[in-house]
Each structure stands twice: as C-alpha cells, then as structure tokens.
Image (cartoon, rainbow, N blue to C red):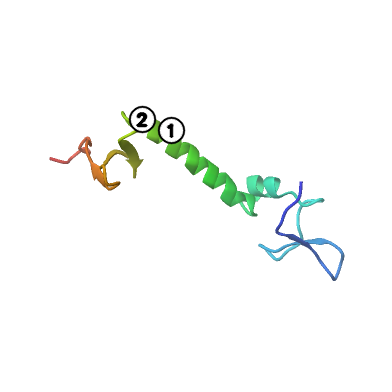
C-alpha cells in the first residue's frame, strides 16, 4: 500500500505526511490504514463518497416508480416531463397540521 500524501523528507530520509506536516506513522506509508485509524489522508474522502453513494442508491430504491420518481433530500420526489422536481407525496412530520 502507498499514500499519495507521503513524501520523502530531504533532511532525514523519512516519509513525511503532507496533510499533518509530521513524520508518516506507517512504514511503508499506508493511506487506507491512516484513513481508518486517524481519519486523515486521501482515502477519507473516497470512503465517505462511497458511503453516500450507497445511501443514495438504497433511498432511491425506496421510491415506488424509479422512472418518474427520485430521492431528493430523503423524500421520494416526482420528476416532471421537463426534468424539474416537485414533491408528489410526503407524510407530515410529527406536530405538523
């Protein structure tokens, strides 16, 4: 494994992290492990993006007709013929009239 944020230091021949500015904790640099253990590095964004995509696909599958409905902000929303969104069905939240 490697990390695109790890650069070799000219002073002491060690790996430096371009995010923290400190010495890399892993030998060799490991971006996935750094993301898992410290929440830093280039893989943090990739993991959150993948998780958001999974959530979107799961929520979209909850919509009744995927040809004319899409999930917008957590609600099944109708897509009109011209591509604009309009809420077609929504349960009122607790306390709403």
- Answer above or below: position of 68 versus 4: above
Q: Is residue 74 visible?
A: no
Disc 1 to disc 2, C-alpha distance: 7 Å
- Element type at mark 2: loop
Q: How many marks?
A: 2
Residue 69: image location, x then y, percent: 31, 36
Instruction: Find the residue positioned furthest to the bottom.
Output: 11
Residue 37: image location, x then y, percent: 66, 46
The structure residue drawn at horizontal position 33% and vertical position 32%, both measured from the top left corner, is 63
User: Image quadrant of residue 72?
Assistant: top left
Q: Where's the C terminus, which quadrant?
A: top left
- Element type at mark 1: helix
Q: Is residue 13 visible?
A: yes
Instruction: Find the residue positioned furthest to the right.
Output: 13
Marks 1/2 in contact by CB < 8 Å: the verdict is yes
Residue 26: image location, x then y, percent: 78, 51
The one of 32 and 4 positioned closer to us in this rendering: 4
Rendered image: mark on residue 35: none
The crowd level at tag 1 (other Cα within 10 Å; few <14, some 14-19, many 20+) is: few
Residue 6: image location, x then y, percent: 74, 59
Q: Is residue 91 left or right of residue 63?
A: left
User: Image quadrant of residue 87?
Assistant: top left
Q: Is residue 25 left or right of residue 65?
A: right
The one of 38 and 3 positioned closer to us in this rendering: 3
The residue that mark 1 highlights is 58
The structure residue drawn at horizontal position 84% and vertical position 61%, both measured from the top left corner, is 14
The crowd level at tag 2 (other Cα within 10 Å; few <14, some 14-19, many 20+) is: some
The structure residue drawn at horizontal position 34% and vertical position 33%, both measured from the top left corner, is 67
The residue that mark 2 highlights is 62
């Amino acid at each position: 494994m490697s990390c695109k944020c790890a650069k070799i230091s000219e002073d002491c021949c060690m790996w430096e992290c371009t995010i923290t500015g400190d010495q890399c904790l892993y030998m060799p640099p490991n971006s996935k492990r750094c993301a898992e253990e410290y929440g830093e590095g280039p893989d943090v964004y990739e993991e959150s993006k993948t998780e958001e995509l999974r959530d979107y696909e799961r929520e979209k599958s909850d919509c009744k007709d995927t040809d004319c409905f899409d999930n917008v902000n957590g609600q099944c929303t109708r897509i009109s013929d011209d591509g604009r969104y309009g809420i077609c069905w929504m349960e009122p939240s607790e306390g709403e009239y």
